[in-house]
Image (cartoon, rainbow, N blue to C red):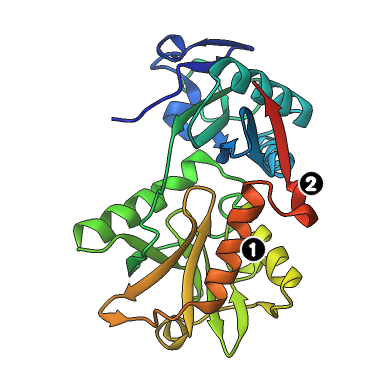
Amino acid sequence: MHDFLPYAWFKGKCVPFEEARISIATHALHYGTGAFGGMRAIPDPKDANTILLFRADKHAKRLCQSARLLLTDLKEEIVLNSLKTWIKVNKPNKPIYIRPFVYTSDLGIAPRLHNIETDFFIYGLELGDYLSPEGVTCRISSWRRQEDCSLPLRGKISGAYITSSLAKTEAVKSGFDEALLLNSRGKVSEASGMNLFIVRDGRLITPGVDQDILEGITRASVIEIANHLNIDVIERPIDKTELFIADEVFLTGTAAKITPIKMIESTNLNNNLQIMHKLKNLLNSITENKTKEFAHWITKVHI
């Protein structure tokens, strides 16, 4: 059971979560013509009446860019204002995960993006660790990451997540926690819903945007944090074999935060994760608004 927050933002207002319902004929349900975001927020450790939102502006911008890929006009200020109102009504007292969603709300059977109604909703749930902070085991998926030429991977398009779902279940049913997907060129792309980093010889390496990855906000944040810590960052293709010989391997994402990989296939990985811990410690400090240099990443909502 999930601990959903009591209110959702639906049809332009806050309503009880149970009343936020859509028709079984909703277009997006049939064709995956929706796009979502994932955000985290926590009560301020110094003030329980304040909620700290991590990089709300970046999340709003990406959701609106995703909407544009669906030929839908969604304004960032609408997302942010709706989000703040929704938080004030729910008054969360624990860490939460927030799911804003833009979708084709029309009722119909024709696959299209023209002459169609769209809408936007928000709901959330209490969420601690999505993956074990001690580390996860991974397998290389038999499913390949889609190509940007066949699906708009710069957005979090809901229909794209069939591949993630297949890969995740394949991994879990074969005894692993998570899946790693290669792209069509056989290079490492990402996990089922997270970006990937490795460390080799003190350098932080991650697949670039040309490797059919999602442009993750936590990924971008980790790169900025690494630059702040004077850690060299390289964005380039990663071969599968590099995963097994890397000094560190870890995943990043809004839900996953920063999670180490402790085993891939039958190979146990190095557990001396010095660089990952530096990045993780600073990221945790930033999300709790304890680092002045990154205070602009935090949006405060007074409840």
Task: Relative to 177, say whether 77 is above or below.
Answer: above
Residue occupying image coordinates x 56% and y 37%? 42
Front residue of this view, candidates 219 and 121: 219
Residue 17, picture quadrant: top left
Residue occupying image coordinates x 34% and y 57%? 167
Residue occupying image coordinates x 39% and y 70%? 261
Residue 236, picture quadrant: bottom right
Query: Residue 298, position in %: x, y?
Result: 71, 42
Identify the secondary structure beneath mark 2.
helix
Query: Residue 150, position in %: x, y?
Result: 56, 54
Amino acid tagged 1: Val
Query: Residue 203, position in %: x, y?
Result: 63, 83
Quadrant for the C terminus in the image: top right
Mark 2 and 1 residues: CB-CB less than 8 Å, in contact? no
Closer to the eye: label 2 or 1: 2
Query: Residue 64, position in %: x, y?
Result: 71, 36
Task: Relative to 216, say whether 136 is above or below.
Answer: below
- Residue at the spot of label 1: 222
Q: Is residue 140 left or right of residue 59?
A: left
Task: Relative to 149, say whether 237 is above or below.
Answer: below
- Residue at the spot of label 2: 296
